[in-house]
Image (cartoon, coloured by chain):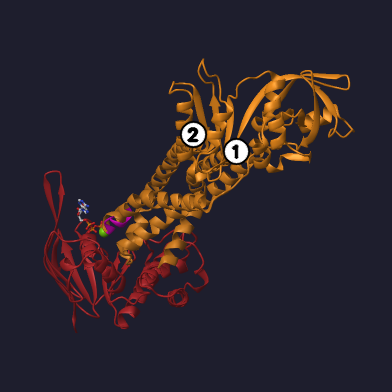
């Protein structure tokens, strides 16, 4: 299996007034293509911070980060945008759907920036929404959807461009157990198709769906046991 | 991508109808006031210029008060003036008011003008009927006259004035022609005037000197050199005394008016531009609010792969749309205002392509200039800060 990302001594600090807050402390993490990794840790341990760095939304204070054979430090804004568009699919903790767009239009969004033609965008978005079981809700606006349905739209949006890595921050955080299990089932399917998945959670039951668990505590990583 | 950006910009404009409308209004007021002011000033200038031209753009008027020893011009001076290069003829004007008797009707305060044959040759379509003054009339001081149209109507209602004999200041004068109704400005109206050979007029009115002469140019472009030559002759005629004469060139007056109204146009357009500037600031304000409101959206778009240039384009298009919309509506409103003004103030309405280009170009420029800073601000947002912004 080929390596998809490699983090070497990643440090992230925030400076509040004169005080220095180390959120990520020399993180080393290597993930191969096709893995399904859970990053497990308590609130405030630095999970989201790590995910933002993995997803090229944020930059580390120090350390080296290689993503899909690119040293992220060397990339400019435009190239970063391209990487986020092609290599990474985000599922945010708070869905992050645009309220003014329908489910279908929300799913189309990343394809606009990938330069897909309108007809193909429509077709692809409808297909993917069918796959997450929302064919009859395609033209609903986010506020006309339940939390689980919104989460599924967010997942559909994250995989519609067929990114190398699916990055999900607490994908089941806002959902009941049953819906959470459905979402996990979907992730499993996507992983079986060969997609690399990195999922952030503080719930051990959810982490159990993945093949590898990495624990994070006070900004330090340790490999965990797979149940 | 451009089409997508336009669609997104449009949907955002529609989504904030009231705000967009108010911002459009700002630009609309600016553009319409510029268009209306420029068009009105240009129309008024055109009508003033054409009125002055109707007084004779190919004519230089000399007023010669003269000195105490030599009051006015004599025949010899007239000959010299008529020999200047590019001068096709001179016509002295002798004028006065006197009484007028026809068939027991007495009319006082009638204005009598003395002219020569050159005047009737140059102002060719001045006659309605009969003939004008000819050279023999001038040389022989013939007692003839041409009558203005209103005067003719008033005194000879129903009868033909040509051939009738009237008394002007006690002298019997035969009417030989009737003037056309003059439609031009009141300044140039001859409707209530009687025109005689200037030699006879001098006798009738008791005028001894010629103090006013019209000089007709064969080439109006040479007005400057002609004016100089005339001045030289007049200087020597009046012994180089100051304030003895004036040479009035219509072209000069038209030029001066052109300069004044040109400056007026610039001044008014400048004042109106201030309102366009305020409109531009309105756009900037709206766009800055829009960027702040949509910070999370910008962060999300960036996370999904939008390049900074694409974000910038989307916001820039939005502000250009707003201001172009204002510009086009302003153009229409400005034209309506100018048209109404044209009807009320009675001048011919004309709109130049230049004005339209100015309106559309100006508003597009305003949209670009004032939209640029907010658009850049949006494009430079850090995706993670933007996403966290709630
Ligand atoms: N912009 C920031 N400035 C200062 N401190 C920050 C900033 N962002 C995060 N932190 C701090 O970094 C630490 C880790 O935050 P992070 O969001 O990564 O936690 P998390 O593990 O995702 O927690 P949760 O499970 O609650 O989402 C927290 O203590 C937080 O206060
Ligand atoms: Mg978090």
The local secondary structure at tag 1 comes to: loop
Q: Which residue shows up at 62% across the image and 39% down it? A: B54
Which residue of the protein is positioned furthest toward the bottom in this rendering?
A1
Relative to B76, residue B387 above or below:
below
Q: Pick whichever of labels 2 and 1 is earlier in the sequence.
A: 1
Marks 2 and 1 share the same chain: yes
Q: Which residue shows up at 26% across the image and 75% down it? A: A210
Q: Is A97 on the left-hand or right-hand side of A21? A: right
Q: Which residue is mark 1?
A: B56
The percent position of residue B90, horizontal first and vertical second, equals: 59, 36
Disc 2 under 8 Å from ligand 1? The reply is no
Disc 1 under 8 Å from ligand 1? The reply is no
Chain A as rendered: colour: red
Relative to A185, residue B226 above or below:
above
In terms of image quadrants, where is residue A83?
A: bottom left
- Chain in orange (letter): B
The percent position of residue B45, horizontal first and vertical second, equals: 55, 39
The percent position of residue B225, horizontal first and vertical second, equals: 45, 40
Q: Which residue is mark 2?
A: B230
Q: Which residues are magenta?
A: B378-383
């Amino acid at each position: 299996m080929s390596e998809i990302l490699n983090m070497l001594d990643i440090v992230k600090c925030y400076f509040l007034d004169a005080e220095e807050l180390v959120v990520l402390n020399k993180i080393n993490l290597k993930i191969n293509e096709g893995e399904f990794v859970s990053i497990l840790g308590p609130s405030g341990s630095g999970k989201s911070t790590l995910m933002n760095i993995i997803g090229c939304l944020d930059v580390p204070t120090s350390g080296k980060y290689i993503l899909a054979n690119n040293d992220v430090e060397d990339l400019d804004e435009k190239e970063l945008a391209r990487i986020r568009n092609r290599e990474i699919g985000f599922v945010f903790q708070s869905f992050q759907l645009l309220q003014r767009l329908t489910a279908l239009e929300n799913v189309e969004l990343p394809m606009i920036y990938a330069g897909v033609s309108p007809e193909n965008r429509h077709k692809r978005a409808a297909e993917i929404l069918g796959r997450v079981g929302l064919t009859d809700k395609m033209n609903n606006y986010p506020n006309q959807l339940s939390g689980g349905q919104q989460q599924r739209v967010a997942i559909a949006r994250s995989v519609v461009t067929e990114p190398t890595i699916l990055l999900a921050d607490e994908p089941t955080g806002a959902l009941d157990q049953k819906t959470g299990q459905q979402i996990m089932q979907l992730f499993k399917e996507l992983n079986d198709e060969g997609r690399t998945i990195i999922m952030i959670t503080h719930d051990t039951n959810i982490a159990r769906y993945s093949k590898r668990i990495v624990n994070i505590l006070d900004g330090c990583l340790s490999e965990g046991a797979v149940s | 991508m451009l089409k997508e950006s336009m669609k997104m910009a449009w949907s955002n404009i529609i989504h904030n109808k009231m705000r967009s409308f108010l911002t459009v209004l700002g630009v609309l007021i600016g553009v319409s006031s510029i268009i209306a002011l420029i068009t009105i000033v240009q129309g008024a200038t055109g009508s003033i210029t054409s009125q002055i031209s109707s007084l004779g753009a190919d004519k230089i008027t000399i007023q010669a008060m003269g000195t105490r020893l030599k009051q006015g011009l004599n025949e010899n001076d007239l000959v010299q003036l008529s020999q200047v290069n590019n001068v096709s003829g001179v016509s002295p004007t002798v004028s006065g008011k006197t009484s007028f008797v026809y068939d027991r009707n007495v009319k006082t305060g009638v204005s009598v003008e003395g002219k020569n044959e050159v005047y009737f040759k140059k102002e060719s379509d001045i006659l309605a009927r009969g003939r004008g003054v000819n050279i023999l009339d001038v040389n022989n001081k013939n007692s003839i006259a041409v009558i203005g149209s209103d005067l003719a109507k008033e005194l000879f209602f129903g009868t033909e004035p040509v051939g009738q004999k009237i008394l002007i200041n006690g002298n019997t004068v035969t009417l030989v022609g009737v003037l056309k109704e003059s439609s031009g400005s009141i300044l140039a109206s001859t409707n209530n005037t009687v025109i005689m050979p200037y030699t006879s007029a001098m006798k009738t009115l008791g005028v001894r000197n010629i103090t006013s002469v019209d000089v007709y140019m064969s080439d109006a472009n040479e007005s400057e050199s002609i004016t100089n030559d005339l001045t030289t002759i007049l200087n020597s005629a009046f012994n180089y005394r100051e304030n003895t004469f004036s040479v009035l060139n219509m072209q000069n007056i038209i030029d001066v008016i052109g300069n004044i109204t040109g400056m007026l146009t610039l001044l008014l357009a400048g004042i109106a531009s201030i309102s366009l500037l305020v409109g531009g600031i309105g756009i900037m304000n709206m766009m800055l609010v829009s960027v702040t409101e949509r910070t999370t959206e910008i962060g999300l778009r960036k996370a999904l792969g939008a390049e900074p240039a694409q974000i910038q384009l989307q916001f820039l298009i939005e502000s250009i749309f707003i201001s172009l919309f204002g510009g086009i509506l302003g153009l229409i409103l400005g034209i309506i205002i100018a048209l109404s003004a044209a009807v009320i103030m009675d001048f011919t309405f004309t709109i130049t392509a230049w004005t339209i280009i100015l309106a559309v170009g100006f508003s597009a420029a305003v949209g670009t200039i004032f939209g640029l800073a907010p658009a850049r601000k949006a494009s430079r947002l850090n995706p993670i800060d933007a996403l966290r912004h709630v």
